[in-house]
Amino acid sequence: MFVGDSRKVHGVTQIEGEGQRLSVVSYLRTDLGYAEYVEKAYPPRSPRPQFRVDRYQIGIPSYRRQETLKKKTLAFLNRHNIDPKRVTIFVADEAEYKIYTKALQESPYNKIVIAAPGIMGVRNFMAQYYKEGTPVVFIDDDIQDLETIPFVKKAKKDEDAREELVAGENQKEQNKLEPVRNLEADVIFRGFNAMREYQSYIWGIYAAPNGYFLKNRVAVGLYYIIASFYGTIIRHSKDLLVGTADKEDYERSVLYFIKDGRVVRLDSVTADTDYYGEKGGLQETRTPKTVEEGAIYMLKKYPKYCYDLGKRQKGAMKGMHEVRLKESD
């Protein structure tokens, strides 16, 4: 039996003499090389999802951002050699459809579907558009790249304890972010496989693009799954549809947690994007009033799972009303 680190080059020696080799490769864990954090996750409430990870699809909601979409998210997918046949772009109405069709006529990523107006409408439409059981990655239209923190080996004092891959020893090392090398292998496949392993139906990435807070771990429990980049297995369940535009990703995180007992987050990956500075998209309709309405909606409907942070005191979103999930850690 050969036991090796799947993240390094490995193989078997050449056969000498007559004979036939029969090889069975068994991956005992789908998060090899990563720590996990599951102490406070609920027991699984749903059966283990059944799906083919190699049949995943990508859905991109976009509104008045046809040029941003081309320059950022579609360029990002192209750099990582993502098959255009996997990608569907969802727009609000017929007028937007015509604009995007013209803008993307020379792009290989040109499958466009008319969904529904408003972020809540398009998110709920996309959740019902794909067939039951389809693995889908939903990506915003302004993603420039995904970034991660480097792996540093750290041995435990206990000689019998397994070696872990953890974040860097010092702040300088932790703040160092580097682009994800292989979007499909290092993020998409890993996210879906970790989700299946931990019997969840949604996975996401860390919201803040700050390496100091990122960890090389798979977090399982109640966590905020930001809408800019996440994967899920499609279920046509009304209890998973969101009821608010602002804070819709907070509500989705809670809905999946309630239904399945846990969500999964890759805490070593984050997105390179300008959440509040890009014109178009949600910025076209977001106001302090709509943000406050979303916050109040969450606090009234899900008091067990979130709490009030009040209004931001500084930054690009100064004056906006925020909430936070009662995350597992």
Image (cartoon, grey):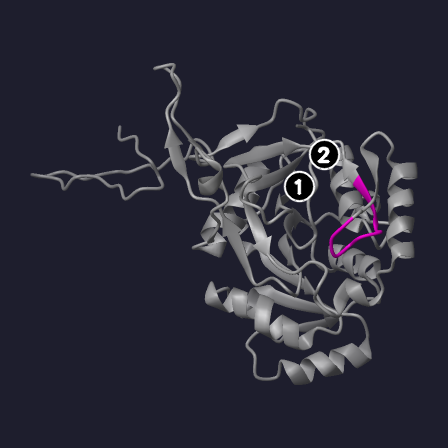
Q: Which mark is residue 201?
A: 1
Which of the two residues, 38 or 126, is positioned nearer the viewer here? 38
Q: Quadrant of residue 161?
A: top left
From the top left corner, tell me how far across and down residue 327 is, in percent.
Answer: 71, 32
Q: Is residue 200 visible?
A: yes
Amino acid at pointer 2? Asp
Magenta: main secondary structure equals loop
Q: Which mark is residue 260?
A: 2
Decide: few, some or many residues near mark 1? Use Cα within 10 Å; few <14, some 14-19, many ≥20.
many
From the top left corner, tell me how far across and down residue 325 is, in percent.
Answer: 76, 36
Which residue is found at the position 72% from the left and 34% from the top? 260
Residue sitting farthest toward the front = 314
Residue 159 located left or right of residue 246: left
Q: Quote the CA–CA distance across marks 1 and 2.
A: 7 Å
Image marks 1 and 2: residues in contact by CB distance under 8 Å: yes
From the top left corner, tell me how far across and down residue 236 is, in percent.
Answer: 77, 49
Work out whether mark 1 precedes mark 2 in sequence or the reverse, and give the earlier one: 1
Relative vertical location of residue 266 with respect to residue 55 in this rendering, above or below: above
Q: Which residues lie in the magenta part? A: 314-323
Which of the two residues, 272 or 244, is positioned nearer the viewer here? 272
284 in the magenta segment? no
The quadrant of the rendering that contains the N terminus is top left
The quadrant of the rendering that contains the C terminus is top right
Amino acid at pointer 1? Tyr
From the top left corner, tell me how far across and down residue 259 is, in percent.
Answer: 76, 35
Which of the two residues, 25 or 296, is positioned nearer the viewer here? 296
Q: Secondary structure at mark 2?
A: helix
Q: Quadrant of residue 267?
A: top right
